[in-house]
Image (tube, rainbow, N blue to C red):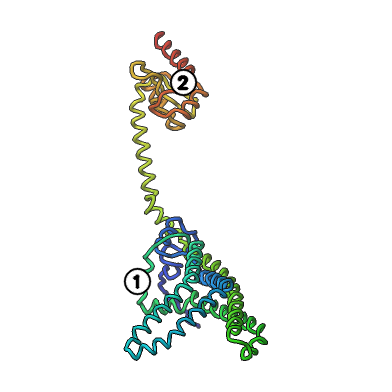
Amino acid sequence: MRDEFCFLMEYDLQWFAKDGNGGEKTEPATAKKLQDARNEGQVAKSQELNSALSLIALFLMLKVFISSIGESLFRNFYVYYNKIPDVINDSIGGMSAYAASVIINNTILVIVKILAPVFAIGFTVALVSNIFQVGWKVTTKPMRPKFSKLNPLNGVKRIISKDSLFELLKSIVKVTLIAYVAYSAIKDHQNELFLLYDIPLMQVILLVGTIVIDAGLKISLVYLLVGIADWIYQKHKFKEDMKMTKQEVKDEYKNTEGNPEIKGRQRSRMREASQRRMMQNLPNADVVITNPTHYAVAIRYDASQYSAPVVVAKGEDYLAMRIKDAAREHQIEIVENKPLARMLYANVDVGEEVPPELYQAVAEVLAFVYSLRENR
């Protein structure tokens, strides 16, 4: 006979939860969460796209202005190179350090003036690219130190993660494409490169500059494709990261709009208080106009207080029955007029005067009620 064993194990059902905030993140991010993330500096942005556009602008500018830039550099090079003998001669009088510093400062200033447009265009393109991707929003929160980043466990998690693997794969693809494009661009000029020793220096510089700029433009265009693909991925990733659980959506709604249950109870109490006040004013009515089953509207007319008849109470279905019961209790006439009851219920609130277009119909009902009272 085989023994049978029964094992009882206790499980914590929280082990099977997707996260600690009420389940799997399936709901799109709310406007408030997106705005909060924006204020924190969390946006869908591709740095690759910024770099690609900046490189394209740089090489295009070099292609257009390389001749003038090169001419300026060479001209200033000859000017300051010819001043070296003066510095050597001044060294006999002890003025070499001062003269050398003047030449160096002037040289740096000239280089800055020549290259300033290049850096300005690069900065402008990078700024426009960022604004195009995420809009204009200045925040310093991403620059604030966070001690959580110093946690080695968090660092290991960032290194070994899906995002880090994607960045590694992207870097490998990027380097491979750039290397292939650079090799192809230089290979097209390989015959010209063998002639570098046989041509003048100026032609060598122009040839090398042309090769570098052409290769740079091709690399930049390939880099642009990588940047566009990365931008699309970053937007998709940001959208997925910003998703919320159903519980998070409910909690946010409670924090921003208030607890819906509490607001519902408040509306119910306000409605009950309004109905109580309405029923207290009902004994002052002159007539109750009914549908006869669905609507009931109580009318009062006092020429000393109002310029027109006033609706003192109205109700639908169950409340209409209560109004009719109260009217019978206080011996208020109940008159059936379906069109008038519907018009009054739909267009006149409690405490408001009857609109002029209904004067005639309401006056006929009041005249009928007053005649009944006189006969009695």
| Residue where numbered disc 1 is placed | 146
Residue at image point 57% right, 69% down: 229
Q: Say which element carries label 1.
A: loop
> The disc labelled 1 sits on which kind of residue?
Lys
Q: CA distance from mark 2 to mark 1?
A: 69 Å
Depicted 117 relative to depicted 215: above or below: above
Asked if residue 238 lies left or right of residue 142, the reply is right
The image position of residue 172, as x and y in percent, is: 55, 80
Along the viewing direction, whichever of 18 and 172 lies nearer the viewer: 172
Q: Say which element carries label 2.
A: helix
Depth check, mark 2 against mark 1: the one in front is: 1
| Residue where numbered disc 2 is placed | 356
Quadrant of the image occupied by residue 156: bottom left
> The disc labelled 2 sits on which kind of residue?
Pro
Residue at image point 34% right, 32% down: 276
The image position of residue 127, as x and y in percent, is: 47, 65
The image position of residue 295, as x and y in percent, is: 47, 28
Along the viewing direction, whichever of 308 and 290 lies nearer the viewer: 308
